[in-house]
Image (cartoon, rainbow, N blue to C red):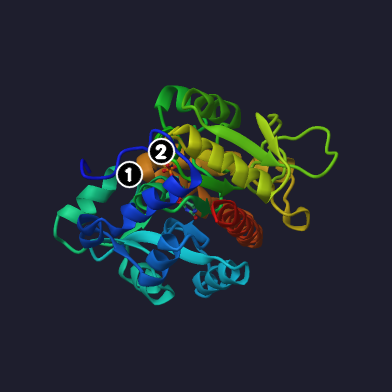
Amino acid sequence: LRRLPSIPRQPNYAFLRSHYQSYTSAPFLSRLINIHPEVADAIANNRPVVALESTIYTHGALSEDFPHALDRLVREHGAIPAVCGVYAGVPTVGLQPAEIMRMVSEGAKKASRRDLAYLVGKGDKLHGGTTISGTMVLARLAGIRVFGTGGLGGVHRGGESSMDVSADLTELGRTRVAVVSSGCKGFLDIPRTLEYLETQGVLVATFADEGQERVEFPAFWARESGSPSPAVVRDEKEAAGIILAQEKLGIESGLLFANPIPKQFAIPRKDMEEIIATAVREAEEKGFTGNANTPYILKRIRELSQGKSVPANKALVEANVGRAARIAVELAKMLD
Ligand code: PSU
Ligand code: MN
């Protein structure tokens, strides 16, 4: 990594562009990471690109056509999709739907930052479905600025004693990628998650409607969490301006843009609370700790809600990926 270009000292838009171009053209990087030619071309020519994670496929229960649906959605907005993951031991930016399906059927390890070198270096040709943290690492190496997904990991309930704090939060503290999510997953400890993000130096800004008085940080299936959002953003253009300011300042931390689930799919907090409490308690009783905790809880919530959580989950991912694509389009305009 010593050979990566240094952070520009006097950044201007033109300089930032060439900075990113040299990222992807660095010969050692292209040997190490497989960046799909369409994605590499878009990055090199300042065309909008949206990073997507692969854990939602390998460790979620999104239907077989969902990778295609998200791919189409990004393209309809005029951007290029770049699903990130480790495919047969190769860190890949721009996984194709058929490759994703192969990872799902052959089985993949859930991969956050700590798992990347293991999967790549061990030589066993393992697949890794990258979480938000793992995806941010790959997106940053490729030079992608915007990433759309479902819900962020966070501080788990009881995290003050279990110390279960998602690596997504420390990743946002150290890696400059803008993540668009529906806040964090609703079974987490949201006030502590927001405290931790503040400590890590992460901007948390929630998209709000014109004239909306109280803006809360959203909680995945619910539009409200009871916790006010630290900052508010009106539209995609504003978000793009903030991303560029972060770059011009040379601050190497991520940004979190929270996008409340579309109203017609929202499940009120009180309707989910009992189900969430049961799922969290069971996970503890059965010993689902570490990176097995989140997939177990999400699976139990799907079962206990009799599948009601699934359409909501899909709708929110689509809404976030659409927002991410529009932000990427605005960014590309500003850099032109
Ligand atoms: N969606 C799912 N299952 C998951 C996740 C999302 O259906 O496991 C992931 C996201 O990739 C997120 C990760 O980054 O959970 C956080 O996991 P943990 O709480 O172990 O840090
Ligand atoms: Mn954890």
Q: For residue 103, which quarter of the picture?
A: bottom left
| Residue lying at 31% horizontally and 39% vertically, measured from the top left | 6
Tell which of 170 and 163 is nearer to you. 170
Tell me the tag on residue 113.
Answer: 1
Pick the residue in front: 169 or 24.
Answer: 24
Give the mark, 1 or 2, whose residue is nearer the N terminus: 1
* Residue shown at 36% from the left, 71% from the top: 37
> Three-letter amino acid code at disc 2?
Glu
Which image quadrant: the C terminus? bottom right
Asked whether the residues under the numbered discs 1 and 2 touch, taking CB atoms below 8 Å apart as contact, a structural biologist would say yes
**Is the CB–ligand 1 distance for label 1 below 8 Å?**
no
Report the side of 176 relative to 274 (left or right).
Answer: left
Q: Is residue 108 above or below residue 143?
A: below
Residue 94 seen in this snapshot: no
Residue at the spot of label 2: 171
For the N terminus, the quadrant is top left
Q: Residue furthest left?
A: 123
Is residue 54 visible in this depiction of the protein?
Answer: yes
Q: Residue at x 52, y 45 (%)?
A: 178
Q: Which of the two residues, 252 or 289, is positioned nearer the viewer here?
A: 252
